[in-house]
């Protein structure tokens, strides 16, 4: 790979394989964290999932990576192509495939892979390990990061009941309010799947017939206040010093600087109910894609007679 091993004097290294290695020399606690993001058409083989801790819709952390043995095992599985399997889902039931236009042929399952290091760890040893990974390991899935909110009301016939759309960019003025909106949906006992690390990305809100009214009730100030508090606590937990290496991986995968978390926390303090109501309408009612069973389709059509039915 021709890697230049002046790792002690730098804080970030991008390998030819596309892997990003981050180093924080200020933190004295010895830690290693590894995070990888998969494109939505791939999944980790069932017998390998125990190696990972899942966070978000398609983002995984490697467990116990501080023991170099775990990192070596992961790299061995990755280099031998024994980690992933491709989902085979056809038709309009696979909303993510529709939204992402199927990626136009084969590409690597990995969208990004980041290694975070803190403390006095032997960086040369780590680089020797990751040098084993092929240069083509990171997918060139540029379309994944150019997704835009779906505009217009669309109903897909499918096997699952959910509402879906695309999250805003982390640099958007809507970003903090959007997180509060998702938390609010979750607090209404609506199952939400989304990727907190990467945006824009698809998110899903699962529904059932007896919960469909939960999406039509305009958020009240009391529940908005609770949702804001929940998101604030989550952001604060991300920056705990004892999780420094994981924090490096998290912020890097989001594509943001660590200082932006302070900015978001300040924005949360200044959010008004009107900001959440705007997001509630923009990402749920002013353009969503849904897949329901027949009875739910009829209910949604009554709520939104202007919806387009996708056969």
Image (cartoon, helix red, strand yellow):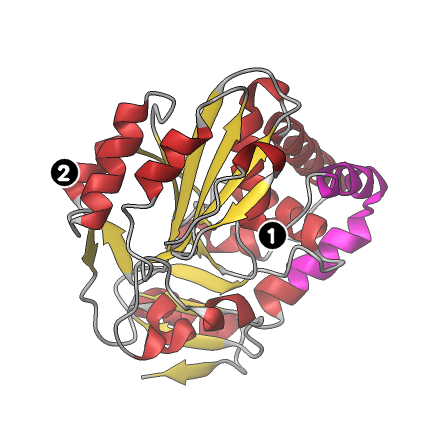
Residue of label 2: 47
Q: What secondary structure do most residues of the magenta stretch adopt? A: helix
Q: Which of disc 1 and disc 2 is earlier in sequence?
A: 2
Q: CA distance from mark 2 to mark 1?
A: 31 Å
Residue under the point 66% across and 45% down: 180
Residue of label 1: 255
Residue 187 visible in this rendered orientation of the protein: no
Residue 99, x across and y down, in percent: 42, 73
Observer-nearest of 277 and 140:
140
Observer-nearest of 83 and 276:
83
Residue 120, x across and y down, in percent: 52, 19
Pointer 2: residues within 10 angstroms few (<14), some, or many (20+)? few
Residue 69, x across and y down, in percent: 26, 25
Q: Which residues are magenta?
A: 259-281
What secondary structure is marked by label 1?
loop
Observer-nearest of 300 and 154:
154
Pointer 1: residues within 10 angstroms few (<14), some, or many (20+)? some
Are the residues tagged 2 and 1 within 8 Å (C-beta)?
no
Residue under the point 66% across and 55% down: 170
Residue under the point 56% across and 57% down: 199
Identify whether 64 is placed above or below 103. Answer: above
Q: Quadrant of residue 243?
A: top right
What secondary structure is marked by label 2?
helix
The number of discs equals 2
Residue 43 located left or right of residue 65: left
Q: Quadrant of the C terminus?
A: bottom left
Residue 99 located left or right of residue 247: left
Q: Quadrant of residue 26?
A: top right
């Amino acid at each position: 790979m021709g890697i230049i091993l002046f790792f002690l004097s730098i804080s970030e290294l991008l390998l030819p394989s596309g892997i990003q290695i981050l180093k924080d020399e200020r933190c004295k606690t010895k830690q290693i964290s590894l995070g990888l993001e998969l494109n939505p058409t791939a999944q980790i083989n069932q017998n390998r999932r125990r190696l990972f801790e899942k966070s978000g819709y398609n983002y995984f952390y490697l467990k116990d990576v501080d023991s170099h043995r775990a990192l070596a095992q992961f790299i061995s599985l990755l280099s031998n192509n024994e980690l992933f399997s491709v989902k085979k889902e056809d038709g309009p039931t696979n909303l993510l495939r529709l939204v992402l236009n199927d990626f136009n042929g084969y590409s690597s399952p990995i969208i990004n892979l980041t290694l975070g290091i803190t403390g006095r760890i032997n960086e040369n040893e780590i680089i020797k390990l990751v040098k084993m990974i092929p240069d083509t390991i990171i997918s060139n899935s540029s379309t994944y990061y150019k997704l835009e909110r779906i505009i217009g009301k669309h109903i897909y016939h499918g096997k699952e009941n959910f509402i879906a759309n695309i999250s805003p960019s982390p640099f958007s003025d809507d970003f903090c309010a959007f997180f509060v909106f998702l938390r609010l949906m979750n607090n209404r006992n609506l199952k939400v799947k989304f990727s907190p690390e990467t945006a824009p990305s698809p998110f899903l809100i699962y529904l059932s017939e007896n919960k469909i009214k939960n999406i039509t009730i305009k958020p009240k100030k009391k529940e908005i206040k609770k949702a804001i508090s929940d998101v604030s606590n989550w952001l604060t937990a991300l920056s705990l010093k004892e999780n420094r290496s994981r924090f490096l991986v998290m912020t890097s995968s989001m594509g943001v600087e660590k200082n932006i978390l302070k900015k978001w926390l300040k924005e949360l303090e200044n959010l008004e109910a009107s900001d959440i109501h705007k997001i509630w309408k923009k990402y749920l009612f002013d353009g969503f894609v849904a897949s329901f069973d027949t009875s739910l389709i009829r209910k949604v059509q009554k709520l939104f007679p202007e919806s387009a039915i996708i056969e």
